[in-house]
Structure formats: structure tokens, C-alpha cells
Image (tube, rainbow, N blue to C red):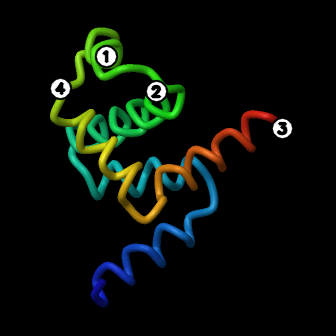
Amino acid sequence: QNSELDDLFEVILSLQSKEECCRFFEDLCTVNELESFGQRLKVAKMLYEKRTYHDIEKETGISAATISKVSKSMNYGPGGYELALARLREKEQK
């Protein structure tokens, strides 16, 4: 990490609502980038549910390369997807 990333993460942590997040990320990212982030999270959810690559690709149209990248991150990465999915499930259960 570097100071620019530290600043970015501090700004993200300072946002206080979904609306603020939407406003910030719409300024920060292109529509395609935001859609890609959403797609990757969807893939992570489906992989967590033990769906196959074929099922995910067929249902979503997301490429096998993207599915593989998410899968590798989930299996060998620092655990960010798992943490995010756990928090999302907690929020949905409330």
C-alpha cells in the first residue's frame, strides 16, 4: 500500500450512508468499473453457494476468466470477499 491508497481507504471508511457511497463511487469510477465490481461480488456470492463455473457463466454472462479470478482471490487472497459476504449476510439477517 501507499499513501494514496491509504487516503482512498480512509475516505471510503468515512462515508456514512449508501447514498454517500454512491455519490463518491460515481465520481471515482466509470459506469463499467462499477458494473464490474458488482459482477465480481455476484460471482463471489455464487461461488460461496458452491455454484459451478458453467452455471455462473450461463446465468450471468460473466466470462470464465473473471469467474476464475474471483475464485482464486477467494481461495488464495487475504479474505476480503469472505469478510464482505459475511457482513452482507449479517445485514440481510437483521
* Mark 1 residue element: helix
Q: Is residue 18 left or right of residue 1?
A: right
The crowd level at tag 3 (other Cα within 10 Å; few <14, some 14-19, many 20+) is few
**What amino acid is at disc 2?**
Met
Q: Quadrant of the N terminus?
A: bottom left
Q: Residue at 66% of width from left, 49% of height from top?
A: 87
Q: Measure how far apart labels 2 and 1 are at the Cα level.
A: 10 Å
The answer to whether marks 2 and 3 mark residues whose Cβ atoms lie closer than 8 Å is no
Badges 2 and 1: C-beta atoms under 8 Å apart? yes
Residue identified by numbered label 3: 94
Disc 2: which residue = 46
Q: Amino acid at mark 3?
A: Lys
Measured Cα–Cα span from mark 4 to mark 2: 14 Å
Q: Nearer the viewer, mark 2 or mark 1?
A: 2
Distance between mark 4 and mark 3 Cα atoms: 33 Å
Which secondary structure lies at badge 4?
A: loop
Looking at marks 2 and 1 on the same chain, the residue that comes earlier in the sequence is marked by 2
